[in-house]
Amino acid sequence: MSPKIVILLFVAMLSVSTSPLLAKWLDSVPALLISFWRMTFASMALWGYSAFKPKVNLSSSGRNKTIVAGIFLGIHFAFFFGALKYTTIANATFLGTLAPVFTLIIERNYLKRKFNSPTMFGIILALIGAGIILGYKFDLSAENTLGNILALTCSIWLAIVMVISENIRTKDGTLPYTRMLYFVSAFTLLILILFSGDSLTGFSNKEYFGLLMLGIIPTILGHNSMYYAMRYVSPTVVATFPLGEPILATIFGAIIFGGNEIPQAYLYVGGLVTLSGLLLLTLKNSQNGK
């Protein structure tokens, strides 16, 4: 794995770690609206940026696949932010980052790919570390059941998006792909909002700013970095890096919201295990199945 891809994946991990914190800041905004404005602002920014770049369009096959991926991505975000409303941040963060489990199932069983032992061990370590950090306050009580199901299901949707993205990125560039991806995702969410009866506007300046930051930091910086890496690295490896999100989200949350809810031992041990797994992935060439 080249140093450039390693840096991009760690930038992605850092960026997506802000998502649950920004969502908490936007606690009064309905989940579908958070998702819609996140995708809308990201799409608008990328289309605006495209105006100053040479015009590059998606291939016809890439466009059709992007429409499918965009629909699934919209559903993914609706489920994730919905999960944050019905379960704990710990539950939503961990269950919502299990995409590598499902991409691994798809790649091994349907794409017939094989992963070397160090790669598999790195993925397992990253999962175990995230579980250590959040496990002690992981709550499967009845009142969290709906949120837990939404969070787990959102990982499945994201896994499908990543597998589709890899196929598209073999021929099409990151910019034309993601600007269309986010546009379709926003349109999908708009349809869901029309059925929900929520108003698209009427937020405070602070809430608009938070929605804009969701579109820029975890989406353009985070997801675009992952989609760029998808051309060079297995979807399962790319999907593993957001498992570092609980570590960073915990640190950022303690700084921003205060409190000292997480014992240091859990953070240090879990963080060390997860980062060891991610380091192992970066030291190995993970393209053996491509």
Image: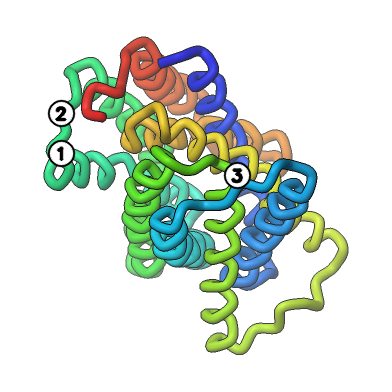
Q: Nearer the viewer, mark 3 or mark 2?
A: 3
Distance of label 3 from label 1 (alpha carbons)? 29 Å
Residue position for label 1: 108
Q: Residue at x 52, y 73 (%)?
A: 188
Residue type at mark 3: give it.
Leu
Instruction: Tell me the crowding category of disc 3: few under 14, some 14 to 19, or many 20 or more residues within 10 angstroms, Cα based.
Output: many
Residue type (three-letter) at the residue carrying disc 1 = Arg
What amino acid is labelled 2 in the image? Lys
Q: Are marks 2 and 1 in contact (CB under 8 Å)?
A: yes
Q: Nearer the viewer, mark 3 or mark 1?
A: 3
Image-quadrant location for residue 233: top left
Name the quadrant containing residue 202: bottom right
Q: Could you say which disc has been placed on residue 275 in the image? A: none
Residue at figure coordinates x 21%, y 46% from the top left: 106
Q: Secondary structure at mark 1?
A: helix
Local secondary structure at mark 3: helix
- Sequence-earlier tag: 3 or 1: 1
Residue 131 position in % (x across, y down): 35, 36
Image position, residue 74 (x, y; %)? 49, 64
Please tell me which of labels 3 and 2 falls first in the chain: 2
Residue picked out by circle 3: 175
The residue to which callout 2 is attached is: 114
Q: Position of residue 279 (x, y in %)?
A: 40, 15
Label 1 Cα crowd, 10 Å radius (few <14 / some 14-19 / many 20+): some
Tally the numbered discs.
Answer: 3
Residue found 59% across the figure and 86% down from its top? 194
Query: Up-down: is 189 above or below 90?
Result: below
Q: Determine the residue located farthest toward the right in the rendered image.
A: 205
Residue 8 appearing in the image = yes
Tell me which residue sits at (70%, 54%) in the image: 47
